[in-house]
Image: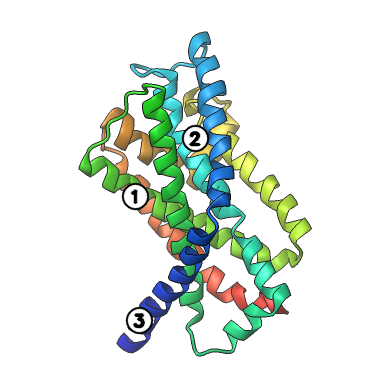
Amino acid sequence: MLNYILQTITKSYIMAKMEIVKLLHDPTELITRAVQPILWLGIFGEALSKVRAIPTGDYTYLQFITPGILTQSVVFVAIFYGLSVIWERDTGILQKILVTPTPRLALVWGKMISASVRGLAQAVIIFLFAIILRINLNLTFISVAGVVLIVLLGASFFTGLSMIIASIVKTRERFMGIGQVITLPLFFASNAIYPISIMPEWLQIVAKVNPLSYMVDGLRALIVSGNYSSLPLDIFVLFFATFFISLLSTYMYPKVVI
């Protein structure tokens, strides 16, 4: 058992390193994906902050929305990670990987870790842009460490979800459509751009079972409010959801080639 765990961790690191090397050789995706959150903060956030129609308590709307845009950016990177799985299948790489003695869980964890690195890169871009916009954020060692943990868990969860989708739909065109259908409702049915309290009751129920809401809530506590009372619950929900989705992804991953 111990040998299996050590092998899984080692192979996960190797798989993640391969993905990160590919990213370093071609960082174009990170640059292009940075455009969307910058537009959300620079245009949508700035515009609504002038209207002041959304109650955000003692914080400006730009402060309130920054964790939500960070979450959106990480989720959009992670949820489309299944495209690489379909590409690997179409080129024959996946079939070669699956016949190796590498634990299937290591293959899944490797993808999750590499998606997390991309998510952290997005976080750096958003924080730099927030500084340019003079958004007052609570950036301390503890809060940044907490952001890293939550981004890791959130990116891992949605990467696992994307791999499950990839194992079901089989084609890139269908995957893109389903990815959009999943991510946009999850984003708008969360506390990313407005408080849960102003939602209709049925949407509040959806928001409270939406993992994206817990990701936003944790990030908001860390870099905006400094109130950590709900942070343990946010991390627990994300950890449990990520653990469950990793096991389900491990079961579904080989089915991509069927």
2 vs 3, front mark: 2
Identify the residue at image location x=51%, y=22%.
45
In the rendered structure, find residue 246 and report the number of the disc placed on it. Answer: none
The secondary element bearing badge 2 is classed as helix
Disc on res. 69 = 2
- Residue farthest to the front? 25
The residue carrying pointer 3 sits among few (fewer than 14), some (14 to 19) or many (20 or more) residues within 10 Å by Cα, namely: few
For mark 1, does the 10 Å Cα neighbourhood hold few (<14), some (14 to 19), or many (20 or more) residues? some
Q: Residue at x 49, y 32 (%)?
A: 191
Of residues 192 and 63, the one nearer the viewer is: 63
Marks 1 and 3: which is nearer the front? Answer: 1
SS for dot 3 = helix
Counting from the top left corner in percent of width and height, residue 114 is at 47, 62
Name the residue tied to disc 3: 5
- Give me the C-alpha separation between circle 1 and circle 3: 24 Å
Q: Residue at x 31, y 39 (%)?
A: 230
Query: For residue 55, which quarter of the picture?
Result: top left
Measured from the top left, where is residue 37 in percent x and y? 53, 35
Can residue 159 be spotted in the picture?
A: yes
Q: The disc labelled 2 sits on which kind of residue?
A: Ile
Residue 189 appearing in the image:
no
Neighbours of disc 2 within 10 Å: few (<14), some (14-19), many (20+): many
Dots 2 and 1: beta carbons under 8 Å? no
Q: Secondary structure at mark 1?
A: helix
Q: Which residue is mark 1?
A: 148
> Quadrant location of the C terminus?
bottom right
**Type of amino acid under label 3:** Ile
Identity, as a three-letter code, of the amino acid under mark 1: Val
Q: CA distance from mark 2 to mark 3?
A: 35 Å
